[in-house]
């Protein structure tokens, strides 16, 4: 499925938002869109307890119905629909292997704008070797754009910036390529954010050393600049803002997500005795970001 964006759908508001986001991204990429509904058969004895009998969505008809709606809203896009059976996390992870991008919905947290990654989404993110984007319910095209002069979000205005959380000590080309390419397709700015730990004396409540803080900030900004210089040359028309700030990276990224079209974070392939997992920064961003989140796996 080279040149394909794959989206997992189940009829929920989250998956509907994911399908629309995936359609817009497929248009930007010039790719096909494939909708997959993964149905895991429920033992008859368990069906009444799991609510299977009262589901409003026919799994056999769901992807076709959603695909038809996407075609009406995106008439120039090639859209196909598939209904398959199996364990959702395993099937979706397998589908992602041959796709440019996998897009999934994520449950919204009540009380504030954010994510609550379900077990399927988290299992997929932890295993796949292709970029995965998580989209919350209610996400609309206008949310990716700046407000118009009257203060109202509008899909006719410029895109908000793409925000990349970068580990400048261990930068990876796959993460940088994805972030720069995403910003370039949108003709918007890329904000690269790196958080560095506060000096130990802060934790112990000792007086700050402004001179030491300044040297640490200068050193970190110099490292960040060296990492980004080759990518600035590769994407000369992309406006790049690099920020080095003291503090917990996850908190800085979550705060920056409020003004982002898309958050981009990396996830390192790691061996673990209990199986694949997500790093703490990526885990926090997935659960609390105020924008769609792209997780890019890397070595």
Image (spheres, grey):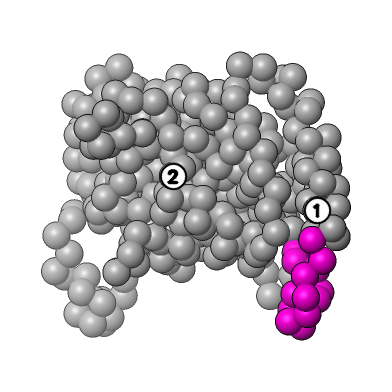
Is residue 118 or residue 80 the one in the foreground? 118
At label 2, counting other C-alpha atoms closer than 10 Å, the crowd grade (few under 14, some 14-19, many 20 or more) is some
**Residue range corresponding to the magenta coloring:** 197-210
Q: Secondary structure at mark 1?
A: helix
Q: Are marks 1 and 2 in contact (CB under 8 Å)?
A: no
Where does residue 177 sit, x and y in percent of width and height? 67, 32
Which numbered disc covers residue 214?
1
Queried whether the magenta region covers residue 198, the answer comes back as yes
Q: Is residue 263 left or right of residue 118?
A: right
Is residue 201 or residue 1 the one in the foreground? 201
Nearer to us of marks 1 and 2 is 1
At label 1, counting other C-alpha atoms closer than 10 Å, the crowd grade (few under 14, some 14-19, many 20 or more) is few
Residue beneath disc 2: 259
Where does residue 73 sit, x and y in percent of width and height? 21, 27
Q: Which is more N-terminal, label 2 or label 1?
A: 1
Q: What residue is at 20 percent from the left and 74 percent from the top? A: 51
Where does residue 186 sit, x and y in percent of width and height? 47, 25
Is residue 88 or residue 175 the one in the foreground? 175
In the figure, 78 relative to 288: above or below?
above
């Amino acid at each position: 499925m080279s040149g394909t964006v794959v989206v997992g759908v189940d009829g929920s508001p989250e998956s509907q938002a994911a399908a629309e986001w995936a359609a817009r991204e497929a248009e930007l990429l010039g790719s096909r869109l494939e909708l997959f509904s993964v149905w895991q058969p429920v033992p008859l004895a368990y069906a009444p307890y799991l609510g299977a009998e009262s589901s409003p969505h026919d799994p056999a008809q769901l992807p076709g119905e959603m695909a038809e709606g996407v075609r009406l809203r995106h008439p120039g896009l090639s859209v196909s629909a598939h209904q398959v059976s199996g364990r959702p996390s395993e099937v979706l992870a397998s589908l992602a292997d041959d796709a440019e991008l996998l897009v999934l919905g994520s449950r919204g947290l009540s009380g504030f704008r954010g994510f609550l990654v379900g077990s399927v989404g988290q299992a997929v993110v932890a295993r796949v070797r292709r970029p995965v984007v998580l989209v919350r319910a209610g996400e609309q095209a206008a949310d990716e754009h700046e407000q118009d002069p009257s203060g109202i979000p509008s899909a006719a205005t410029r895109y908000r910036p793409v925000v990349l959380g970068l580990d400048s000590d261990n930068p990876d080309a796959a993460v940088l390529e994805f972030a720069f390419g995403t910003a370039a397709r949108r003709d918007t700015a890329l904000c690269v954010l790196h958080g560095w730990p506060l000096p130990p004396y802060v934790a112990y409540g000792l007086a700050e050393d402004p001179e030491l803080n300044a040297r640490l900030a200068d050193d970190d900004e110099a490292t960040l600049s060296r990492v980004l210089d080759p990518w600035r040359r590769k994407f000369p028309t992309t406006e790049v803002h690099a920020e080095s700030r003291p503090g917990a990276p996850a908190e800085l990224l979550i705060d920056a997500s409020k003004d982002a079209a898309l958050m981009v974070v990396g996830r390192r392939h790691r061996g673990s005795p209990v199986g694949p997992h997500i790093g703490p920064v990526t885990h926090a961003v997935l659960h609390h970001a105020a924008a769609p989140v792209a997780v890019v796996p890397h070595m």
